[in-house]
Image (spheres, coloured by chain):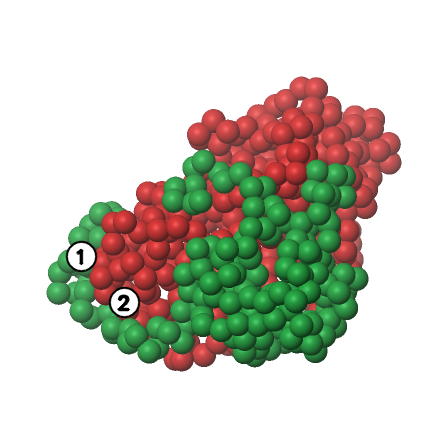
Chain colours: A red, B green
Amino acid sequence: MSERNGSEIAWNRRRILAAAATGIVGSTVAGRASAETLADVPAREPGADLGALSARSKYVQIGRIPEAGPGRRNVDPADAINSKAPLQKLIGAITPSDLHYERSHAGAPDLDPSKHRLLVHGMVRKQLVFSVEDLKAMPAVSRTIFLECTGNGWENWKKADGNLTVQNTHGLVSTSEWTGVPLKFILGLVEKEAASTWMLAEGGDAAAVARSIPLTQEIVDEAIVAYGQNGEPIRPAHGFPIRLILPGMEGNLNIKWLRRLKFGEQPWMTRWETARYTQLLANGKARQFQLRMETNSVITQPSGTMQIKPGYNRISGLAWSGHGKIARVEISTDGAESWQDAQLNLPALPKAQTRFQMDWIWDGKPTKIVSRSIDDKGNVQPDRDSFIAKMGTNALFHYNAQQTWSIDQAGRVQNVLS
Amino acid sequence: MSCRRKVLLSGAAVFALVSSAVASEFGRPATPNEIALWDIDVRPDGKGLPQGAGTVARGKDVFSENCAACHGDNGVGGIKDRLAGGQGTLASAMPVKTVGSFWPYATTLFDYIHRAMPYQAPGSLSVDDTYAVAAYILSLNGILPPDGKLDSHSLPDIRMPNRDGFIPEPEFSNGSK
């Protein structure tokens, strides 16, 4: 074989790999035209003028999808209660702010920061009012943190609809860098009384969403009154001008449009922590103040409604835990019979999403792929059967069972329970 | 600025900064009158309930004008949350969670209506009408009689059917009742 033929073969192999990759991510690109030789690649030409904002490429189609409750998809945005992040099209571990999942209880209010105030009162020696400028002048911290809606995964409690994407099943989790004032600094300013063990956080939205927050050492040490997200002021959908960030805790506890912190010695038992975000068990009792988001992971490529080809495939996904760092992710490509370690894209940050990946040669036979994560506290993401045995099928919130995707002979990927 | 950067190295150092004169640079004292404007929360022991009263009969009218469009004529069959019935279903395959079957505290009902309802105009009901509509919703669930009424003293004394239906997470149950 001549040297020329050898390089042609290598080139063809690269093309095959590229084609395989296209099969996985091709849905993000519209109107792909092939360039068979370099002569087909369009000539260089002067580009667009400079502008105030840089938009996405017109070749990239990516967006969130507004949905209502479980099974209520493709709804009018006016009827939606959340908007899910396109996990199957995201790259790396950070979620762009405009693609960060959104959940609100009375829409995103239009708040003028010059008129917004934070009242801190109750069991404190100094009851104080802060402006947004006051908060921005205080010492600040930044942390990369995942937020997850308490209802993430709720499509799969009772049954698995085969034609769901990972955006439908797991799109209520996102990761941003959040910047703001450590809650601890504000506690010092107001001189919180030692006897106060609970804090009510309330939003400035129409529903005035309010949650009682237990002042554990972990929460006091890690909570942030944030005004920045991914290097810019927090966007209105995510709490502009200020919101609470409680790393590792359920999404709705991270009160958006924050306007009041009140200190007391018992929980207030608001609607959201009694009637709403509690988990009904099979025996009719409900778990309450199950605040921490559990050890979780999902394969995003390939995932529901995609189609793969036999041969080389790269499996990739996201893992996260409200307990700490992701220590390990294992992948099974034979329906949870055997497991292999996935590679983690480092650094794996505590209470942030971590990207994982693994090479896989698919032999073309029907199979099932599934991931499970393990965090640095030793928590293992449960398989579905043991998870349901513990939580029943009525809990609605805090679903973190392993996600299985089935692959049929044609390479079609479908959502299944296990 | 370099001085500030140093104190950011640890949470403890941030905390220590506060005890210095810097504390006076941030915020201003809140006055009792302005706190009263925002201090709307109500606890299970009734702390935070404003003075006022309302009857089931008045509540029926308030409900029909402000609530029935979303929640149905009798708190059932509307496009939004069902408010009545469902008692005895929580351990079934199709649990029906309503105020009567699921909510553990009647004080939460007042707090929620007062802060968040009606959806299009939260806070628009008077205090008396809020007691009245809470009384009506409790009557739909058989918790108050048709000639019943509610005020700041009687509301916290109501024992909801599912009062003992919750298991607080041990890690976060410090001080919860």
- Label at residue B17: 1
The chain that hosts pointer 2 is A
> Where residue B44 appears, x then y in whole percent?
47, 55
Please determine whether, in this image, residue A272 is positioned above or below residue A288. below
Name the residue furthest right: A410
Which image quadrant for residue A45? bottom right
Q: Where residue A166 sits in the image (x, y, percent)?
A: 70, 46
Looking at the rendered structure, which numbered label has been put on residue A127?
2
Q: Are marks 1 and 2 in contact (CB under 8 Å)?
A: no
- Residue A256, image x, y percentages: 48, 63
Nearest the viewer among B136 and B8 is B136
The chain carrying label 1 is B
Q: Which quarter of the figure has residue B124?
A: bottom right
Q: Is residue B58 left or right of residue A192?
A: right
Q: Residues within 10 Å of mark 2 (few under 14, many from 20)?
A: many
Residue A56, quarter of the rendered image: bottom right
Q: Rounded to the nearest whole Å, what is the CA distance between mark 1 and mark 2?
A: 19 Å
**Badge 1 density bin: few <14, some 14–19, many ≥20, Cα 10 Å:** some
Please, what secondary structure does the residue beneath circle 1 have?
A: helix
- Left or right: where does residue B177 sit relative to residue B71? left
**SS under mark 2:** loop
Q: Residue furthest top?
A: A338
Q: Which quarter of the image is occupied by the C terminus of chain B?
A: top left
Total count of labels: 2
| Residue type at the position of mark 2 | Gln
Residue at 35 percent across and 55 percent down: it is: A264
Instruction: In the rendered structure, find residue B6 and report the number of the disc placed on it.
Output: none
**In the image, what residue occupies the spot 64% across and 56% down?**
B143
- The residue that appears at 61% across and 38% down in the rendered structure is A285
In front of the other: label 1 or label 2? 2
